Amino acid sequence: MDRQINGFLIILWRVLLRTIVAWGIVISFAHSETHDQRIKKCEAIPVAVPAFSCKGDGSIVPKTIDAQGHCSKPEDLYSRCVYQSTLGQLAKGNTDGVEILYSCRKKPDGKNTYKNDKTDSYYDIAVIQHDPKTGNTCFYQHLGDTSGKSIPAPNKDTGGKFWNEKPDFCTSCHSNGPFVRSPHYADVKDGANKVILPDVYRRKPGKHSYKVLHDHFKVYDVDRKGNDCTLCHSIGAYESLGITPKKRIGMVNYLAAGSLMSLRESRTSGCYSPLKSGKCPSPTKSGYHDFMVGMMGIDAAGAKAAVKELEECVNKKPMPRDCTLTKLSP
Ligand code: HEC
Ligand code: HEC
């Protein structure tokens, strides 16, 4: 009798296990979008990303770094002071008004600031393709040592090999809208002396459209009555993919309001700051890069409190009644 029950339990367990494995495969298949599938979806944007060259089509991001390695406008993504990054706009002046911006970043390499580097080698090449009329947006990224001389168009044969990073997580930082105007890039001008990044003030809470076409962490617009951040521009939240998705305020907002030392702070590895100390502090004098603090009457405590207020809209149950949370991307 005991043996029979045991046998039954073993069979039950095997069936259960098989179901779990089968569903696991189904779920992971459902989430593994290929480069070609992504390109097809992104064709809804009327102007495609062309081939380009890092230096030829953009501007070198100006830098000033003091003797201690501090800078006022660090590169926030890798939390470092670095020369020779480039920022540029492609398909300029296209009649559809599509905005295609790219950045070429040097390899995160300890204390290397690339001050006298005249080479064409880059490590992180990224593109954002955005149609302001519809909000449709696509992200592309290459990671790994490469020459920045002739970058292939994503929709050409060699494109699938080159654009090797899955761009689903980009919205965890690119949450307030498609572009991030950190001081590193915010004022960079093109050859015609025009600021490359589009104006931040066109993104009003609940009013701008932002729809990422490929697989991505879902994006939400967050607003709360009387909030000091959304007074000026929209603030976004994202929801990670996976079995237990969680909503969070876009990471750049914690940085900009001084609640986070750097975007790499929470990581256990991959700290590239010259001030390396286990965590990854921002390479500024204060250790923080709270570039929103001081904007029109917002002090450090006020800025942090304003982000906290919005955070409650995202994770407090029940949601405070003066909050609005709008899902932007399906
Ligand atoms: C951890 C945060 C973070 C993630 C994740 C992230 N970015 Fe960014 N990105 C930034 C920051 C910050 C800037 C502004 C420059 C700086 O200070 O580093 C930026 C700037 C850019 C720019 C230059 C135009 C602009 O908006 O300023 C492009 C292009 C870009 N990112 C593409 C991507 C792509 C593609 C992905 C996903 C594959 C991605 N990013 C993921 C933080 C992030
Ligand atoms: C007085 C208007 C104003 C207020 C208030 C304001 N911002 Fe900004 N914000 C700006 C401007 C302008 C920029 C563009 C950066 C620049 O020009 O240096 C910007 C850029 C940003 C960026 C860079 C990414 C992006 O979306 O381009 C973040 C993040 C940000 N703000 C977060 C916040 C947070 C968080 C608060 C509240 C604590 C806040 N802002 C309050 C005006 C404001």
Image: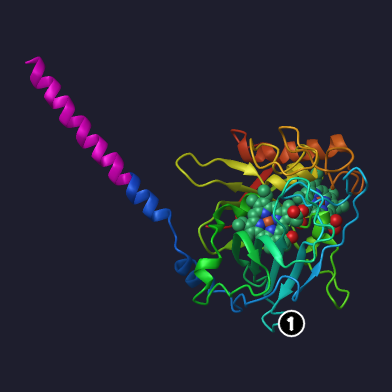
Q: Residue furthest top?
A: 2
Residue 63 in the image, given as x and y percentages of width and height: 87, 58
Is 23 displayed left or right of 7 in the figure?
A: right
Q: Residue at x 16, y 31 (%)?
A: 11
Q: Residues within 10 Å of mark 1 (few under 14, many from 20)?
A: few
Residue 229 in the image, given as x and y percentages of width and height: 79, 47
**Between 101 and 313, the one nearer to me in the picture:** 101
Q: How is the image coloured?
A: rainbow
Is 145 displayed left or right of 76 in the figure?
A: left
Where's the N terminus, which quadrant?
Answer: top left
Q: Secondary structure at mark 1?
A: loop
| Residue 16, magenta (yes or no) | yes
Quadrant of the picture in which ligand 1 is shown: bottom right
Residue 51 in view of the camera: yes
**Between 169 and 218, the one nearer to me in the picture:** 169
Residue 211 in the image, given as x and y percentages of width and height: 59, 62
Q: Residue at x 59, y 34 (%)?
A: 318
Residue at numbered disc 1: 93
Q: Quadrant of residue 185?
A: bottom right
What range of the chain is rendered magenta? 1-23
Q: Residue at x 88, y 74 (%)?
A: 193
**Between 193 and 330, the one nearer to me in the picture:** 193
Q: Quadrant of residue 137?
A: bottom right
Residue 253 lies, with reference to residue 142, above or below; the image says: above
Residue 165 in the image, given as x and y percentages of width and height: 55, 58
